[in-house]
Image: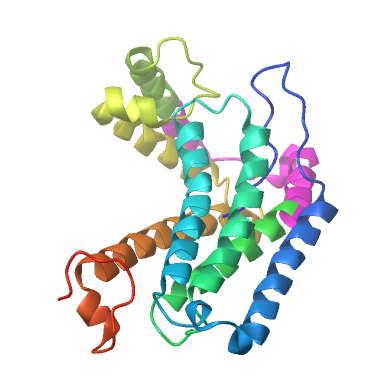
Amino acid sequence: MLQSPHFPPTDPRVQRHDFPDARLLQLTVAAIVVIVLWFLVRGVLPEMWRAPGSPALYFTGVAGVLLLLVPVAFVLAKRGGHSANPVGWFNAHIVCSLIGMVLIAIHSGGFLRRPPALLLLTLLALAAIGVWARVRGSRRMAATFASKAPAFTVPDTATRERLRALIIEKRHMLAELDPQAIEGTFSVNLPHFLSHPRLALAYRKLAREESLLLGSRRAVPAQQAWWRPLHMALAWLFVLGVAIHLVTVTFFAGYVADGGPITWWHLTAW
């Protein structure tokens, strides 16, 4: 699950050591080559690497899921305000995502016509979007920030009045939500939702309305505007898919096996 790497370190002692674009491409190509090679040689591998749900493939899948949860931990740390070294988190995000994708491909046992194979397709889509965002999207974002203000439309009088009212309302909320924050740079994160859920939701709603009135997404190309929402949607879809898969193989093993032998660890064989 790859995201834009442009996170300024919150601690001045933290130096940037993120992956260059060339290294990211090399790692991604290497992961894809390993997956392709595994599918090519799968037929001559021992039975434990070809039988769905075998102990070897079961624990390979567990390891893959754990690695793929590192990006989720990154998101939670970022939203929780605890990512002191975002570049380090991002590097772990890349490495763990790619290794996890390889392990999930191996875990599939080559049976790509079953519903869980959609999780592997989701991972491939996530990787493709993430690599595009880093290699091409980041350049477009830099060009956008360097462009002149006339690229953005000037709001009419009614819109300016509504924006002014929104900002006043947001400042009133912020005084209670986070008195030390500055309205122009503040964004709601996990601690705010936990401590003031009603205010956090209301502030988030106002911020979204403000963004719509300003036409922030309309001012940039569609790919640039929507890659991250799509990336995050696919990421959470993958997490949901993993949760469903774990529940079914653990509690409905008989249904998953479809009359065949149950070779994996489970609690019930319904």
- Residue at 73% x, 16% y is 13
Q: Quadrant of the C terminus?
A: bottom left
- Against 210, residue 168 (above or below) is above
Task: Pick out the residue farthest to the front.
Answer: 46
Quadrant of the image occupied by residue 264: bottom left
- Residue at 52% x, 77% y is 49
Q: Is residue 156 magenta?
A: yes
- Residue at 40% x, 26% y is 165
On the question of residue 208 being in view, the answer is yes
In this view of the protein, which residue sits in the foreground, 116 or 149?
A: 116
Image coordinates for residue 153, horizontal then vertical, percent: 63, 45
- Residue at 65% x, 78% y is 38
The magenta-colored residue range is 135-164
Image coordinates for residue 202, horizontal then vertical, percent: 30, 32
On the question of residue 3 being in view, the answer is no
Task: Pick out the residue farthest to the right.
Answer: 22
In this view of the protein, which residue sits in the foreground, 151 or 6?
A: 6
Quadrant of the image occupied by residue 18: top right
Q: Is residue 241 magenta?
A: no
Image coordinates for residue 243, horizontal then vertical, percent: 32, 60
The majority secondary structure of the magenta stretch comes to helix
On screen, residue 94 versus residue 212, left or right, reads right
Image coordinates for residue 186, horizontal then vertical, percent: 50, 24
- Against 156, residue 49 (above or below) is below
